[in-house]
């Protein structure tokens, strides 16, 4: 006979299962699924969308709430570059040992290339692939600069999407193996539905490979310098009334996304265009100074992704150029020459 | 004999209780996540940025040994309503904010004086006697600003040290020097740190 209030074995089993499920869900929530990072990315994305669709008059009330992501690549040690920095600090990435026979370089170099490429793509996607007008409200009125070509130019604003640092315990020889340009051209984006490479993703699938003379020019103009152990992925945007042609694009490629290299010759997109020395693109990426570099041993060999044309997110249609590139985080003066304002937070 | 189920007894009640418990748990989790997100959205981002910089400076200073110095790159932030500055006071220095009454401190404040630091500032504390924070800079020869003091560096050119460091809206470099009784933070242009050429000096 059942006593009043007595639990049956079935009910006990149900309670135990429910509690176990709840514990597993909590474990998953707090230790596996990083909701804090997820929230940071979503807040950033939301603030970008809000800024892009806010009228100029109230743009100051729509700050860009993107915190620079810090990524440490290491063989065990912590990255000194991030001492004291805890906001948006990603879990360190352990570099694998051994050789990648297929690619003919160390697994660690491949991992670094992969991480940088992914960071660049994430930044490009987050910023609306350069097509959103994020900084258009910064109208300086009479203080707008007029450059040598009488093109009205406003101050450049930038966002540092992420900083990647290589710990001191990583062999410097590994840095010499890094070839980001080649990685972007050849490697497919993980989980890409159509199996596109990074270069195809950056250019809306318009570009599959760099022209031969483009790469040759990059080699020719290489200047040796000491590689850095900290780079930043930088997105910059400049509004200009210049047309795409005046900005340096050929009529065949105007208003299109592109990739280009920063070389001392002022090589334009795809290596087939020439950029006028005073053009907007050359002023943005410092052509002729060879200042922007990545983890590679040589300056002037860095590919940048960009878009020049009409920004599509505002009522008032504006032309401009957006550029995504990596740079040596320690080249402060030179970065500041191009980034007068850094939006987002450290 | 037919068994009669008493009201409220048995599987129906247990299923409802379990379902309710699970619903409450899920609701709690969603509320926690929403709270995180709303807190992130509504926080004072300038103050948060100032806090990040202050934490970074403190950690770097603590990592330095006595007699060492380093050049630290810091990312500034977009400032809408106030201009922010880096300031410092020794523990016996007059005019320091109440926050720094007992210890030497380095603060990032929405203004250039102790009151600004007291009202809207982030301070970090150090066990040294003196702290100097400043920006060696050039001023016009016929100008004189109270609170500035002169120094001559290796270039032989006289400069003034402004008693605070303005936080720019892009990157900047500070040179941190530490010894047993003294911490010094000076802001320079990076090119000046490399060459010490007068044309690379900052303007006041």
Image (cartoon, rainbow, N blue to C red):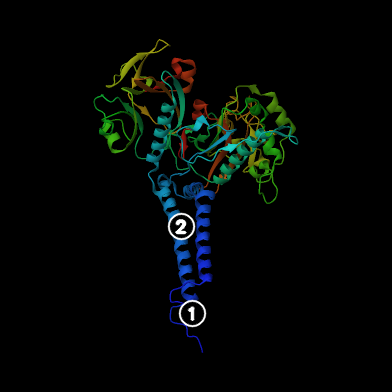
B172 vs A248, nearest the viewer = B172
A41 vs A206, nearest the viewer = A41
Instruction: For the residues labelled 2 and 1, say whether their Cβ atoms are less than 8 Å apart.
Output: no
Quick one: which residue is furthest to the front in this view?
A: A1
Left or right? Give the position of A67 relative to B106.
right
Return the chain for callout 2: B
Return the chain for callout 1: A
Residue A216, by quadrant, is top right
Residue under circle 2?
Answer: B29
Circle 1: element type: loop
Q: Where is residue B74 shown, x and y percent of the image?
A: 45, 30
> Quick check: can you spot residue A210?
yes
Looking at the rendered structure, whether the residues under marks 2 and 1 are on a common chain is answered as no
In percent of the image, x 28 and y 22: which residue is there?
A: B147
Left or right? Give the position of A133 relative to A205.
left
Quick one: which residue is furthest to the left in this view?
A: B94
Measure how far apart labels 2 and 1 are at the Cα level: 41 Å
Q: Where is residue A306 shown, x and y percent of the image?
A: 60, 39
Residue neighbourhood size for the residue with mark 1, other residues' Cα within 10 Å, grouped as few (<14), some (14–19), many (≥20): few
Residue under circle 1?
Answer: A1
Q: Where is residue A221 shown, x and y percent of the image?
A: 67, 24
> Quick check: can you spot residue A314?
no
In percent of the image, x 60 and y 42: which residue is there?
A: A121
Q: Where is residue B143 shown, x and y percent of the image?
A: 30, 19
A302 vs B61, nearest the viewer = B61
A73 vs A31, nearest the viewer = A31
Q: Nearer the viewer, mark 2 or mark 1?
A: 1
Left or right? Give the position of B85 relative to A189.
left
Tally of numbered tags: 2
């Amino acid at each position: 006979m059942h006593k009043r209030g007595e639990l049956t074995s079935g009910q006990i089993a149900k309670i135990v299962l429910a509690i176990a499920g709840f514990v597993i869900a909590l474990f998953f929530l707090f230790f596996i699924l990083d909701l804090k990072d997820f929230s940071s990315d979503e807040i950033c994305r939301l603030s970008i969308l809000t800024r892009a669709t806010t009228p100029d008059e109230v743009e100051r009330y729509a700050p860009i709430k993107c915190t620079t992501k810090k990524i440490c690549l290491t063989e065990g040690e912590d990255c000194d570059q991030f001492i004291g920095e805890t906001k948006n600090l990603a879990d360190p990435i352990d570099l694998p040992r051994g050789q990648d026979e297929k690619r003919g370089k160390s697994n660690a170099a491949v991992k670094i290339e992969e991480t940088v490429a992914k960071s660049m793509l994430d930044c490009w996607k987050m910023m609306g692939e350069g097509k959103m007008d994020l900084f258009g409200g910064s109208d300086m009125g009479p203080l707008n600069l007029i450059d040598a070509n009488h093109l009205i130019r406003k101050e450049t604003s930038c966002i540092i999407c992420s900083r990647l640092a290589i710990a001191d315990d990583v062999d410097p020889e590994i840095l010499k193996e890094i070839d980001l340009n080649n990685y972007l051209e050849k490697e497919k984006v993980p989980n890409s539905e159509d199996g596109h490479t990074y270069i195809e993703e950056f250019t809306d699938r318009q570009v599959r490979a760099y022209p031969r003379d483009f790469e040759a020019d990059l080699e020719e103009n290489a200047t040796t310098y000491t590689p850095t152990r900290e780079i930043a992925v930088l997105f910059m945007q400049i509004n200009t009334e210049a047309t795409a042609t005046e900005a340096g694009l050929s009529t065949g490629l105007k208003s299109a996304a592109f990739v280009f290299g920063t070389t001392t010759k002022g090589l334009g997109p795809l290596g087939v265009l020439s950029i006028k020395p005073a053009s907007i693109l050359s002023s943005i990426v410092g052509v002729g100074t060879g200042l922007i570099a990545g983890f590679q041993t040589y300056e002037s060999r860095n590919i940048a992704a960009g878009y020049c044309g009409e920004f599509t997110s505002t009522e008032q249609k504006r032309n401009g150029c957006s550029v995504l590139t990596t740079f040596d985080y320690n080249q402060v003066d030179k970065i500041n020459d191009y980034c007068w304002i850094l939006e987002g937070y450290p | 004999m037919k068994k009669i189920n008493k009201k409220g007894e048995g599987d129906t009640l247990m299923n409802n209780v379990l379902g309710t418990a699970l619903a409450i748990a899920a609701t709690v989790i969603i509320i926690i996540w929403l709270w995180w997100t709303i807190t992130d959205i509504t926080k004072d981002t300038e103050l948060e940025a100032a806090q990040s910089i202050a934490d970074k400076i403190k950690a770097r200073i603590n990592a330095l040994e006595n007699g060492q110095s380093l050049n630290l790159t810091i990312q500034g932030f977009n400032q809408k309503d106030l201009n922010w500055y880096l300031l410092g006071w020794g523990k016996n220095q007059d005019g320091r904010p109440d926050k720094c009454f007992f210890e030497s401190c380095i603060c990032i404040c929405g203004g250039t004086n102790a009151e600004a630091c007291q009202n809207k500032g982030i301070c970090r504390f150090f066990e040294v006697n003196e702290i100097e924070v400043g920006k060696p800079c050039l001023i016009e020869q016929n100008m004189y600003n109270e609170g500035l003091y002169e120094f001559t560096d290796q270039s032989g050119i006289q400069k003034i040290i402004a008693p605070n460091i303005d936080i720019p809206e892009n990157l900047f470099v500070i040179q941190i020097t530490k010894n047993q009784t003294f911490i010094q933070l000076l802001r320079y242009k990076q090119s000046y740190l490399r060459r010490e050429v007068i044309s690379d000096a900052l303007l006041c």
